[in-house]
Image (cartoon, rainbow, N blue to C red):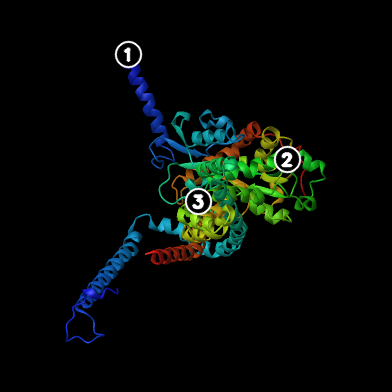
Amino acid sequence: MKLLATTALALAISATSVLAQGTCAAGKTLSDGVLTIATGNPAYYPWVMNDAPESGEGFEAAVAYAIADKMGFAADDVTWVRTSFDEAIQPGAKNFDFNMQQYSITPEREEMVDFSLPYYTAAMAVLTTQSVVDAGATATLDSLAGLKWGAVATTTALPMLNDVIQPASDPLLYNDNADVNAAIMAGQIDAALYDLPTALYLSAVVVEGGALLGQFPPEQSERPDQFGLLMEEGSALKECVDAAISELTESGELAAIEAKWLAEATGVPVIE
Amino acid sequence: MADTSLQPRTKERAADAPTRREVYEAGVRRRANRIALISTVSVVLAIVLLVPLAPGWEAVQRAFFNGRVFAATFPGLLEAFLLNVMIFAWSAPLIALTGLAIALCRDARAPALFPLRLFGIAYTDIFRGLPVVLVIYIIGFGVPGLGLPRPWNSPYIWGTLALVLVYSAYVAEVIRSGIDSIHQSQRSAAASLGLSDRDTMRFVVLPQAIRNVVPANMNLFIALQKDVALLSFIGPVEIFRQAGVYKSLYANFTPYVGAALIFLALTIPATRYADYLMNKQNRARS
């Protein structure tokens, strides 16, 4: 009887792995039957809740498991690693199958690495403090250009800042969100440009007296900020990932995950 | 060189003809030069020929030595480097002055000035013991966070202060070693001439001490030139940060190579000059 149960279990296990092997991703991952996904260190809310992507909580963690599911990997077959931006673009062998940490797809980056189809299109939002708003800053380009700006140096917020807002004085740039917030709280900068979900979180939870002055909706932009999964240049897995993402998009599952994890942003005024 | 006693005093030899020893030494020198040349050429050839054979060379070349990215980003890097030069230009004199003041504090000999001496010791101990980045963060974000109004909370002001604090501690120690290198007899002689302690320091000890430590201080200022880049952590967009921005936009490390070249163009001549000064000093001493 015990032998039978073990055999059944073994059969079941081999059945699932056969299932995974039989799909598009078979033999294309780093280690057979396992999907290795990279995220940031730390991974930020609301993309990943509590810096624990294994829980599947948070927008990117949930999308990652949905993609893995469509590619034929059970939740148990997904392992997570952490990388910085630089590790993700360095030449040589990668330690992940795909990397997911709000990478904006740009043609320049596309020459060095592969991106999947976009899984999210971000509005950009202006994070500032209540005292700056009280001092007369409004959600118009004229008013915004007069502010002292900051941004995270490694994001695509910077080109947007220089192209659209064209601030009167050069923006100050920082390593990460925490440093930008420190500069806002020290009064060294008036405002910073983030993607909307991050800005919503920072203004509500992290920055003391934080306020959202306005947002630039993606429809308005010529080159909207679209997030894609980053893969090694020429990755064989790209077609499988793309197939999974388009399936999720068409079935509406992606929109449902977005609605679940990313807050409604209708309350934030639109900057024309 | 002028040791004529070693030369064989043969009568046949004309006064300006090379001695046998000189001929032998010239031969050794030629042989050494030949070997040096062959070994240098073979090492360079090995690098040039073998590295591109590595399987990942093409990827490395595309990521680090990408001509198109280099051309697109180099002008922007040069422009950003102006900010490094400016920060250096106003930090260096401040560091020299503060360093001198701290060195004098540590050398205060009057019993009543003991607290000053204690301060000098504590200052050098603390700021030589802290990583520069840490001081820049604490002072650059911390002090403005106390609620200073603009423009007094500028990262340029407080970042500069952080550099001055750390580097003046090093400079102070170098100057102090220079002061210690002046023999006690100099002070005694000055005292016997009727100079006060203050005048002895100013006219007798310091002029000699500072001259002795110029090469060592040159090295510190070369290091400072590179550490100016750390100010980018608190906002200023100098060359290192600008290179990081380009890196992220192009997903390519070539801008860092460009920045490295610009740094080298400045630091190599400075290093050579420091070496030259040091050699000159050693010759003068021997």
- Which quadrant of the view contains residue A245? top right
Given residues A249 and B45, the one toward you in this image is: B45
Can you say which quadrant of the picture contains the C terminus of chain B?
A: bottom left
Determine the CA span between mark 1 and mark 3.
82 Å
Amino acid type indicated by mark 1: Lys
Q: Residue at x 53, y 32 (%)?
A: A53
Label 2 crowd bin: few (<14), some (14–19), many (20+), radius 10 Å:
few
Find out whether the residues at labels 2 and 1 contact each other: C-beta distance under 8 Å.
no
Would you name the residue on which mark 3 appears?
A: B176
Q: Earlier in the sequence, mark 3 or mark 2?
A: 2
Would you name the residue on which mark 2 appears?
A: B147
Image vertical order of residue B268 relative to residue A59, above or below: below
| Residue A166 % position (x, y) | 72, 56
| Residue B177 % position (x, y) | 47, 52
| Residue B164 % position (x, y) | 59, 50
Element at label 2: loop
Given residues B169 and A178, the one toward you in this image is: B169
Q: Dot 3 falls on which chain?
A: B
